[in-house]
Image: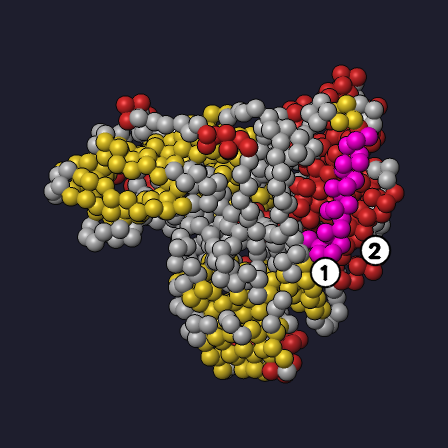
Amino acid sequence: MGKWDFSYKKNDFIDRWTVSKLEEKRFITEPEAFDTALNEGAGYVQIIYPVRKRYLENIPDKNYEDIEMKDINKVYFPFEKARIDYSGFWKECYELNFFAQMFIITGKNKRKNFEIKTCGRAKIWVNGEEQADFSPYERNLGKSTEISLEFKEGINEITVWCNDLAERDANVYFQMKYKDEGELNTFISVTGDISKAAVAEKILKSCYLDKNSYRDREIKVLFTASHNENLEIDTVFYVNNTHLDTKIPAGKATLKSGETKLVLSIPKELNIGYISVILQIRLSKDIIIERILGTEIYIMENFPENIENIKERKKEALKFMSEYGDGNLQKVIAIIEDNGEYSRIKEILDLETDAINRRFDCSDFRMPALIWIYKKYRNHFKEDDLKIIKESILNYRYWLDEPGNDVMWWFSENHALSFHVSELLAGEQFKQDIFPNSGLTGFQHIEKAKKLLNEWFSNFFLYGYGEWNSAVYIPIDLIGCFALYELTEDKEIKEKAGRVLDHSFEIMAFNSFKGVMTSSHGRIYEKELKGRRTTESTALNWIAWGEGYLNQSIMSTVFFCISSYEPPEKLLEYEKWEQNRRLIISNVQGKEKVNLYMCKTKDYSISSALDYRKGKNGHQEHIFQLNITKDHDIQFWINHPGEKELNGAGRPSYWAGNGTVPMVEQYENNVFLMFRISEDQMVDFTHAYCPFEDFDEYIFRGNMIFLRKDTVYTGIYIKNPYKITDSGPLKNNEIVSEGLANIWFVKVMTKEEAGSFQEFTDRFCNMKITAGELYMEIIDFEHGKMSMDWENGFRVEKEEKVFLRV
């Protein structure tokens, strides 16, 4: 056994451990009903499920004597992480356990102070003696506590056991921070070549992809770190989709001594999607170093183009989705419409009905398709299939007031709508039958569902979407709306569904640029921000307007194609804005009355959510977005990371959402962002996504950055010093600016609006800018004096008013 030494100073996170595998054990309780309020906003809400209540009534425990030390042998490589993190997504309820171990060296008997953080439970032994046991058990909300550990002189073994309950998305981690003055010396016990492990870690830490989006099958992995080892690297391609689990091993590759490039080939099974390229270096059974690089792929040779008629676009889209769509029940319909083989249909049907019968989270998104299949496509199935489908529909849990022990999510507007739609359509299909889980007849389910649906519609028509402008969740909402529009027997419900469809396509038309939704979003994920061609909203846009991209995301897109619905023609002008003037769209959405602002021209779109929850903890809200030209890789946004891990499962994550929400204001083509980050946040900087290599020109002048793509110019002012990330996965794609308090200002113009790029940069540099911690004033060369004050709002002098948001 070798010793791998590490040292830490005050407030450093102790991130070097050996760990066990994550133990996952199904947790099953007696079915129960419960009741709680719907979340009508975009933020996170804490819901205590009955399964968690039962779990906390009999919390498991571990004694030191129970631990198999030989199992705590895997070296943990943190990269950017400050903690041991097993976070992920579980479709059913699981009890989770893991162990961690490291050693601390002290010169004499003494106590040392630490801060530990977890969502579940962390129990700590020092030299076999229990010295700390912290168990907040707050789902996904990490809690901290100060602890003091007593050490003997010499080597001290620290062993940690962590336990939690996973209910769908779960933050499962243990974090430990050193709180004393002076250096803390530690080591981990390793079986294997430590020096080679250090080299391999350095190499993988420096790696990055040569592109942000791929149109062909060749991927280049580049490395900035030098090395003199031959390293064998296993590669795996993983499709980022919580509804599917697709991992495709791609074999081994060798990075030879001194080489800085590895060429990989995307497997032929993958054509469209946001994927993870997983690189693994295995030095021993205990030393496996893994790096994950995310990217979009869109490899299409025969994409249907220039189809003017929406009916023809629907036909072409069904053919496309039959071949390239995700393997869900909606694809079954596309395959049938494309006269596909029964064997393809049967394989998907069996997997999807199993997910429904086991009540996987998000199975409610599948149920409308299963009912649609039974109602409209039953002649394509055998009697045994129809029996399985009917039993799946009858035995489902349609609302939380029915008994269950699942962890399906009921509390966002998109899930609530899916459940209510499914219940109504199931009741209409089987009016006389008894539904075993509820004991209700189909008739009774109809009445119950109508009441719930009408409540949902009333709320929507008053406030719009709580998850405003969401490129992820508006398509999910449309699953139910298309299903109601085509299938329900209730004319009033159908009419309301049509109104929601009209309003939703209006939102998409207003907030799309060159076929892609490019606005601020109430909820979003990194894969939708970076994978603009592979988000379902752009496929809906292509069908509706002929601009956008068909792709693998088909849950509402298939329904759109088989429905009779067509969006209002008047919206086309706003989606394809081609006038030589700025289109300004300002509206309010949701019960939170979120003030939304979009400015777009034929060359760019810039949008934001104004003065939304400033200074508060964030979730998945995307507050500011800039897109330039028809190349959807040319985009720019600013946020405060919610976690340190680049590919983490956090909500907020590194790129999607905000740890602390900034104050944002916008006037036409100008956006101000003022950050006051909470001291308890993990990340103490703000940053911008900026793919420098995709721009034609970029210039750095003091605390200003200038970008040019074709004839579109962007000027950026940053109050605090900044640096461009020059190594690792974000090389030349990130601007980082340190500080808990900071101000960013962004201005975008075209050659027609500003003259030459030189003229634009000179005029921007000559603007008078005054910036304090809570105040900023600019004498703008285009709009005159504009000022933003944290307490007193936003003022544009020529407008002769102060914008104080509701």
Q: Secondary structure at mark 1?
A: helix
| Residue 641 x %, y % | 46, 54
Q: Secondary structure at mark 2?
A: loop
Q: Which mark is residue 510?
A: 1
Query: Can the viewer see residue 604 in this picture?
Result: no
Q: Is residue 32 left or right of residue 199?
A: right
Q: Which residues are magenta?
A: 443-465
Does residue 634 lie above or below 116 as drawn?
below
> Residues at badges 2 and 1 in contact (C-beta under 8 Å)?
no
Residue located at (50% from left, 26% from top): 27
Density class for disc 2 (Cα within 10 Å; few <14, some 14-19, many ≥20) is few
Which residue is identified by label 2? Answer: 568
Q: Nearer the viewer, residue 260 or 130?
A: 130
Image quadrant assignment for residue 106 = top left
Answer whether residue 515 is magenta in the image.
no
Q: Which mark is residue 648?
A: none
Give the residue type that dot 1 points to. Answer: Phe
Residue located at (15% from left, 43% from top): 110
Calculate the distance from the C-alpha at mark 2 to the C-alpha at mark 1: 13 Å
